[in-house]
Image (cartoon, coloured by chain):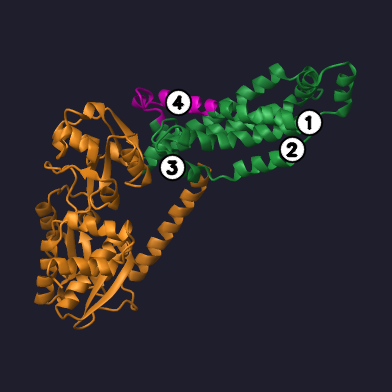
Amino acid sequence: MRTTARALPLAAALALTLSVAVSACANGDPLTPGPKKGQITVGSANFPENVLLADIYASALSAKGAKVGTRFNVGSREVLYQQVQSGSITVLPEYNGALLAYLDARSRATTTSEIDAALRAELPSALEILDSSPAEDKNALAVTAATAAKEQLAAISDLTPYAPSMTVGGPPEFKTRYQGPPGLKEKYGLEFRDFASLDTAGPFTVRALADGSVQVATLFTTDPNIVSHGFKILTDPEQVFSAQNVTPLAYRESMTPVAVQTLNAVSAKLDTAALAGMMALVRNEKKDIDVVADQWLKSVGLR
Amino acid sequence: MNVLTDAWGWLTTSANWHGSDGIPTRFVEHFEYSVEAVLIGALIAFPLGLLTGHTKRGGLVVTSLANVARALPTLGLVVLLVVVMGVKFRAVMIPLVALTVPPILLNTYEGVRNVDPQLTDAAKGMGLRPWQVLWRAEVPAALPLILTGFQFAAVNAVANTAIAAYSSFGGLGRFIIDGLATTEYGEVAGGAVLIVIAAILNLLFFILLRRIFISPGLQPKKLAG
């Protein structure tokens, strides 16, 4: 604990300074360029899945003859949002639930249509969201393939009779969140035997689920470990976990009808399984993000 | 101070003192983990320290071993061991033992090694066998230093047992980890206060041990007046 005890305040202070500095820069910084005429600039956050999605957008748009610039790995939502607001990024792949939580922390919208409606109301007039894709990167309950086969599990509701003999693992904050045991109890009547405090879909959680220390774990739906360990994600018919559909966030003025059409076509074809499969190629097999993006676009006839 | 009032509020909320995740339960867990870490550490380090101190050989090995164990990043080791071994209690206990071994080992070794040679010579001259020299002359004479080693080991254990909570186990660290995750800083500070109290209780325990076990001739002298 010695390390954390020292490192935490330092890291927190550093993060605070950085975020303040960065947001201060992004806010009305004369050096931040506005929208470039006739060009679509695709941006992305600084994690591989978002870069992959942005790459798919850029590649699909250029296949339709648009002039495309890219600014990948820009940073977190706080930074990106400022960039798209100023128009220096024209479009970026967002997750609708997380974006809404950023814009309105008190929103209780959970379904895709509720969230998108709330987003349209919240977003400033310069910004718009395009069609949400069925692909989601959200919290979900996972079990091993063996457990799923043995107990015939497909949805969270199927867990109800087995939960009292099962331990569920997740990050410490999961235990008291509504999108956790309390919500699962309310909507599905699930009462797990025990809760194991692990990490946020990291190595502890994956290891604990794989070796049977926990029987149910919270993972993200596009986690490549799902593919490599053969975990089974249980569907969530009661929508305890709010939707996180991949949704393009765009700077309205720079979007041509062709661009909108193209991105909506991408969203229509993209689903969670396809995204998880691509992430498995990128993370487990170390394939190049551009190659994976282009391969998928060709497979669905968008390139 | 806002956090301190939050901590006080948390500590004085009666709901926090009951049940399987209440303060008494976590306190007992913390105590158990710490004691186990010290006992396992003692099992490894005490005989090794006695042997090397008595024979005055292997000092380099002992100090190197202790330094390596001390340099291990505790939290990093927990993560590594959980990934390698799974979420097992061993994965928490090994890093804790790595923290209890060095003080016991070094203090026992140095304590026994530096016992006045006149004392050991006298013991040998009286016809004591080597192990009798160790038990009846060297260990009692080195006891102040040895107990200090155990005390450091125990403080290390009490302070670092919080890492158990990092990989799903209990103890007072649970309040710190859970409080951080849910931004309940009163709970975090309250948990930290409880760990400090545990460390102070530990200190009192060792003061008592010294009073009881250390030979009167070796007790720190009270100043007159």
The three-letter code of the residue at mark 4 reads Glu
* Mark 1 or mark 4, whichever is nearer to me: 1
| Residue A55 screen position, x and y as percent | 25, 69
Q: Name the residue under label 3.
A: B84
Label 3 residue SS: helix
| Residue A79 screen position, x and y as percent | 32, 65
The three-letter code of the residue at mark 3 reads Val
Q: In which quarter of the image is residue B13?
A: top left
Label 4 residue SS: helix
Name which of mark 1 and mark 3 comes first in the sequence. Answer: 1
Tell me the residue at 12%/77% (across/down).
Answer: A256
For mark 2, does the 10 Å Cα neighbourhood hold few (<14), some (14 to 19), or many (20 or more) residues? some
* Chain of residue at mark 1: B
Real-space Cα distance between discs 2 and 3? 32 Å
**Marks 2,1: beta carbons within 8 A:** yes
User: Is B18 one of the magenta-colored residues?
Assistant: yes
Tell me the residue at 16%/38% (across/down).
Answer: A156
Tell me the residue at 14%/35% (across/down).
Answer: A157
